[in-house]
Amino acid sequence: MTKPIDWRALYASNRAAIRRAGVSVPDRLPPVRIPAPPRAVRRPWHAPAVTGARRRPLIHVPAGLDAATAVPLVCMLHGCTQDPASFAAATRMNAAADRHGFVVLYPHQPREANAQGCWNWFAPEHQERGRGEPAAIAEAIGQLSGSGARQAIDRRRVFVAGLSSGGAMAAILAATYPDVVAAVAVHSGLAYRSATNVQAAFAAMARGGEDPATYGPAAHAAMGPHARVVPALVVHGTVDATVAPVNGEQVLRQLMTANRLAAPDGWELDPARPTETERGQVPGGHAYTRSRWRDAAGALRHERLLVHGLGHAWSGGAAGGSHTDPRGPDASEAIWRFFADAT
């Protein structure tokens, strides 16, 4: 079930940014106890110099794949207090990869970069192409999908998904690397540039960003010469007390606007009028509403999976996993289904 995030430690991990804002914080902080992750086989990867840290991702390649046959790649970005191994176990995305035949990459946010293991989605130096964490993740994708990789990757089907801070970073990648990311899934995350400092980050998490009308144009501007339509899935719980549900609405509206601006024919979709709506309930678990939006040609562009009664947790994750609620619909299956249908 969901484990609480130590927000006091998260705030302390960004002490330098807080001090620049003129707020005094103590120099010495109590140690943060991090539970040991489950054992897993990891392949080393040296991050580009822009990160200033060594990162060790987890890579899952299903058994039986033909190494010469190009397959899709799903990049999974963990949330705060998680690491690649705990996130893989919690989401059971490896099992989905085994069923459907794709490779999974789990980049790692080291504790040197953030004491709680959060991606620094709220910092301007990590919101641009060619800088910080987005550049490091894009580099990891490039290394895994390059010509010398052990398993051939279809670079036209490289997808990114994330939870919480990882969901916010996935939204950043969709905006800054649309030539790399074919489609994106944001689970319990926040819109690109909904915050640009620590204080604004906590405010956005509590009640959404302050100026959502600017988010869509900002995301489109970040795409620059690489601007293109990036299909997007948003998953959020209705009782999320960590990242308020309004953030899911802002992510959806942002990416709809950015995609409209990037579309050659300028099509426009209305968040209030989905093309398709499905309502269901997990036996003994949460009810959910799935909405889909298609363009005039019938191509799937957006989906929202709203899980009623879900808090800040991966929907349908492993029982007892890190930030999971097994009573919700399987988010890993929903994410893969969206990626497959939208590309």
Image (spheres, helix red, strand yellow):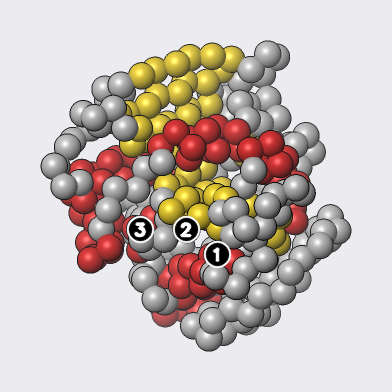
Residue linked to disc 2? 155
Q: For the residues carrying marks 1 and 3, which lies nearer the camera in this image?
A: 1
Contact between labelled residues 3 and 2, with CB atoms less than 8 Å apart:
no
- Tell me, for residue 145, which label it has, or none: 1
* Left or right for 192, reference 53: left
> Which element is circle 3 on?
loop
Q: Amino acid at mark 2?
A: Arg
User: In the picture, which quadrant includes the N terminus?
Assistant: top right
- Viewport quadrant of the C terminus: top left
> Is the residue 123 above or below the residue 158 in the image?
below
Q: Position of residue 125 (x, y in %)?
A: 40, 75
The residue located at (62%, 47%) in the rendering is 102
Which image quarter: residue 177?
Answer: bottom left
Q: Which mark is residue 178?
A: 3
Give left or right: position of 94 versus 273: right
> Are the residues at dot 1 and dot 2 in contact (C-beta closer than 8 Å)?
yes
Measure the alpha-carbon separation of dots 1 and 3. 16 Å
Residue 140, image quadrant? bottom right
Residue under the point 46% across and 72% down: 135
Camera-near label (2 vs 3) is 2
In terms of sequence position, does the residue under pointer 2 or pointer 3 come before the other? 2
Cα separation between marks 2 and 3 = 12 Å
Q: Is residue 197 left or right of residue 326?
A: left
Q: Viewer-proximal residue, 149 or 207?
A: 149
